[in-house]
Image (tube, helix red, strand yellow):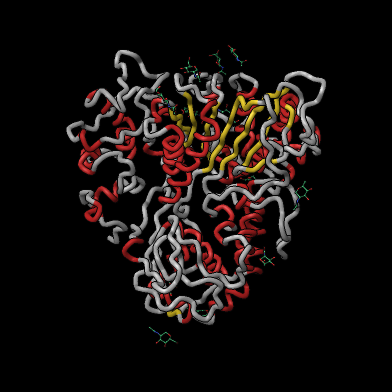
């Protein structure tokens, strides 16, 4: 069996093949660490996958009670039923000292506080381990540019000093970068104003490709052509290239993005947290979602964050209600929509030249535009994943006119990047704008509906009430209970996905992102640019600001008359989204983009009606 890892090399015991086959969705490598191999084997043998997953899931709870009565110094109180509080909810980071603890299914931790949610973790295969320190090559004569940690300075034909890096225009595959702005400047708080409340929703960090993605099938096609496929010229490196990526889990860069975001939020907003309290933060069961939240919390509160935060984990499963993965109970929202069609038309046009270029370099394989798009997509994934080429590369794209010294192949670097011109990179970013616009934003019939449950939750938090009845995909079991939907926090931290965050912005009615995007020509700068909206590690920060008097729209000071006033301020990837542009009631003239609080609530009241959740999510038997 072509094992994707060498467990010996990393000090893990070899895991038997039969275990790999029985537990295909478990990570072979413990992240952080869950169970050691010996413990996993104890669970494995006689039981079905499902029951093992359940026992894995409850293992830590039992572990705490039976084996080790402290975790980070907190003593759980065994006499107290823990259905409402989970003092040991965090994943156990010290399992190596607990060899003797059996894997027994005895737990009282409710599913929504269980951070090892066996059956719901999604795909978790890992990829080939990088070894950049050993494998990179450097041009000794050239000026040394340290990698940080990725090597994103790659030669690209047509790139000129002052142009964006191609890594800032990769749509949803863009490693986190602050937005360049949404049309207004940033303003400091006026004297006497204070931020009193924050709701963040963050995307997970950089990850491996999703299962069944175009890069995976490209890899499979090339593997199938082994022995016949022969590439020359700038594609010659592909003769020895193999697809060796994992699936969906965070890559190291993704951990960093979330940790850094936590550090940023610590500096920006820590005063909104009372150290005497414990807050609820919410994520979903998928592995990358959980670990993104954990890395963020470690960045924000330190490694002892379990003293400060209880992580609530909402199940991500088809037809289950989850406001952080709203498409799960919007069957029509899970289908490829018109965005995929638009993307494919555009890809066929902007990559026509590249496809002709590459076809000429390949024999024994019919190279198509799908292959070209996959190769371009691989630049993004390869760079964050750090896949190794299997042989030292030949001289790098020597026929291109380079604008800065070429860096040879290293890890955290991809040879696929330099195959494309700067203009083709602009086209790549735009392909994602078309896709997300038509599948998850205003171009999709379900665009608003997928995000509406979260919009309702934010409104409920702002208005200090729980939610007893669901007419959308929010989960009332969780939201009609202040244990899982507390109202006493001034800091709310939630974690979600790119498509879902785009639908949330759509559900808030941010029509500044509504516009026709042509499929035949690049329209130039446009508001709906995915690399600015949901790069990896994207975050929307909704602030409530209290001021002693109304603040003038032109920011020349306070109004002379008037009372204490509250404002809503949307900050997306560190730049203001001007609410007045989308909601004239909020005043399009406001240079700071704020919206008066009561006006905002009034505007938002109409949004569930516009989302038409039941109608658009389940039309024509979509819910059957
Ligand atoms: C790239 O930079 C050149 C030179 O500054 C400029 O003329 C051109 O407009 C830039 N292209 C883009 C897409 O920004
Ligand atoms: C593998 O290659 C063969 C012949 O080259 C082709 O008929 C077959 O469709 C290919 N399979 C896949 C999965 O690409
Ligand atoms: C690949 O093609 C090149 C150029 O056509 C040829 O010189 C080379 O021998 C071929 N290699 C293989 C392994 O067929
Ligand atoms: C909210 O109330 C709960 C239950 O009384 C308490 O445990 C928690 O610390 C409070 N949180 C804040 C932020 O005050
Ligand atoms: C986290 O909670 C602990 C224990 O209550 C407290 O001492 C610490 O200050 C809190 N951390 C932060 C970053 O506020
Ligand atoms: C709501 O959440 C609870 C607690 O996690 C879960 O058991 C239940 O299945 C969820 N309901 C739906 C409809 O998703
Ligand atoms: C490529 O396509 C042509 C025409 O459809 C076909 O004859 C040929 O066998 C294909 N080559 C490979 C390697 O699949
Ligand atoms: C929110 O509601 C609760 C109970 O309904 C009340 O005790 C609390 O004071 C309210 N908080 C605010 C900020 O209005
Ligand atoms: C919501 O919670 C309240 C208070 O716990 C309870 O009385 C009510 O029945 C719940 N509503 C629903 C629809 O579950
Ligand atoms: C789940 O969503 C459906 C559709 O809106 C709703 O009818 C149902 O009550 C919800 N269930 C829960 C537990 O929230
Ligand atoms: C962005 O949206 C605003 C408001 O709808 C509009 O005035 C502006 O022209 C748009 N900008 C671009 C570059 O399309
Ligand atoms: C708007 C939309 O996409 N509607 C679809 C919902 O799902 C059903 C079947 O699942 C389709 O027939 C509708 O076209």
Above or below residue 597? Residue 423 is below
Please state if 550 lies on the left or on the right of 433 as rendered: right
Q: Quadrant of the C terminus?
A: top right
Residue at (39% x, 48% y) in the render: 124
Question: Viewer-proximal residue, 55 or 433?
Answer: 433
Question: Viewer-proximal residue, 296 or 62?
Answer: 296
Above or below residue 617? Residue 430 is below
Above or below residue 270? Residue 515 is below
Residue 40 picture location, percent across and down: 25, 41
Residue 394 picture location, percent across and down: 40, 78
Q: Quadrant of the N terminus?
A: bottom left
Q: Quadrant of residue 83?
A: top left
Please state if 189 lies on the left or on the right of 75 as rendered: right
Q: Please give the count of numbered marks on the rendered protein.
A: 0
Does residue 462 appear in the picture of this structure?
yes
Residue at (42% x, 48% y) in the render: 249
Q: Quadrant of residue 168?
A: bottom right
Question: Viewer-proximal residue, 276 or 141?
Answer: 141
Does residue 615 appear in the picture of this structure?
no
Residue at the limit of the structure toward the left, as seen here: 100
Residue 405 picture location, percent across and down: 49, 72
Residue 568 picture location, percent across and down: 68, 30
Please state if 592 lies on the left or on the right of 20 as rendered: right
Above or below residue 160? Residue 264 is above
Residue at (67% x, 26% y) in the render: 193
Please state if 166 lies on the left or on the right of 302 as rendered: right
Residue at (30% x, 24% y) in the render: 73
């Amino acid at each position: 069996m072509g094992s994707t890892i060498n467990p010996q090399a990393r000090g893990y015991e070899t895991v038997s093949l039969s275990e790999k086959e029985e537990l295909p969705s478990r990570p072979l490598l413990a992240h952080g660490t869950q169970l050691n191999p010996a413990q996993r084997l104890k669970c494995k043998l006689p039981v079905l996958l499902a029951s093992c997953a359940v026992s894995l899931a409850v293992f830590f709870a039992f572990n705490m009670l039976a084996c080790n009565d402290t975790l980070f110094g907190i003593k759980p109180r065994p006499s107290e039923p823990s259905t409402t509080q989970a003092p040991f909810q965090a994943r156990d980071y010290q399992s190596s000292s607990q060899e003797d603890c059996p894997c027994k299914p005895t737990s009282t931790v409710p599913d929504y506080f269980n951070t090892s949610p066996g059956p719901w973790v999604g795909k978790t295969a890992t990829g080939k381990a990088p070894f950049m320190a050993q494998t990179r090559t450097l041009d000794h004569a050239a000026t040394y540019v340290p990698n940080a940690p990725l090597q994103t300075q790659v030669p690209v034909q047509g790139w000129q000093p002052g142009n964006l890096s191609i890594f800032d225009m990769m749509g949803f595959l863009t490693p986190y970068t602050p937005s360049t702005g949404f049309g207004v400047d940033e303003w400091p708080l006026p004297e006497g104003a204070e931020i009193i409340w924050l709701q963040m929703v963050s995307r997970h960090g950089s990850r491996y490709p999703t299962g069944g993605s175009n890069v995976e099938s490209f890899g499979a096609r090339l593997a199938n052509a082994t022995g016949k496929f022969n590439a020359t010229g700038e594609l010659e490196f592909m003769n020895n290239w193999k697809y060796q990526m994992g699936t969906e889990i965070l890559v190291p860069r993704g951990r960093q993005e979330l940790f850094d975001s936590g550090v940023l939020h610590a500096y920006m907003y820590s005063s909104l947290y009372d150290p005497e309290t414990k807050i609820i933060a919410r994520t979903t069961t998928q592995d990358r979602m959980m670990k993104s939240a954990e890395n963020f919390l470690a960045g924000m509160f330190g490694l002892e964050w379990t003293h400060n935060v209880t992580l609530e984990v909402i199940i991500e499963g088809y037809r289950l209600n989850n406001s952080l993965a709203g498409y799960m109970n919007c069957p029509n929202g899970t289908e490829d929509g018109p965005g995929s069609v638009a993307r494919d038309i555009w890809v066929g046009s902007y990559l026509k030249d590249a496809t002709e270029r590459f076809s000429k370099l390949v024999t024994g394989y019919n190279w198509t535009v799908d292959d070209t798009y996959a190769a371009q997509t691989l630049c993004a994934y390869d760079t964050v994943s750090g896949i190794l080429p299997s042989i030292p590369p030949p001289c790098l794209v020597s026929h291109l006119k380079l604008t800065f010294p070429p860096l040879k192949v290293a890890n955290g670097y991809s040879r696929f990047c330099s195959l494309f011109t700067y203009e083709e990179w602009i086209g790549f970013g735009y392909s994602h704008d078309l896709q997300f616009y038509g599948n998850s934003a205003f171009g999709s019939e379900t665009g608003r509906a997928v995000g509406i449950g979260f919009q309702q939750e934010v409104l409920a938090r702002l208005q200090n009430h729980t939610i007893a009845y669901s007419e959308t995909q929010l989960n009332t079991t969780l939201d009609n209970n202040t244990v899982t939907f507390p109202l006493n926090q001034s800091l709310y931290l939630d974690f979600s996905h790119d498509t879902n965050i785009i639908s949330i912005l759509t559900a808030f009615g941010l029509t500044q992102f509504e516009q026709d995007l042509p499929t035949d020509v690049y329209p130039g700068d446009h508001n709906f640019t995915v690399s600015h909206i949901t790069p990896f590690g994207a975050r929307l920060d909704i602030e409530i600001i209290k001021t002693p008097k109304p603040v003038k729209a032109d920011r020349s000071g306070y109004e002379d008359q008037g009372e204490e006033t509250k404002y809503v301020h949307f900050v997306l990837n560190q730049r203001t989204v001007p609410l007045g542009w989308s909601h004239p009631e909020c005043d399009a003239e406001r240079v700071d983009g704020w919206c008066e609080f009561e006006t905002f609530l009034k505007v938002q009241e109409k949004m569930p009606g516009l989302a038409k959740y039941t109608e658009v999510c389940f039309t024509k038997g979509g819910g059957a």
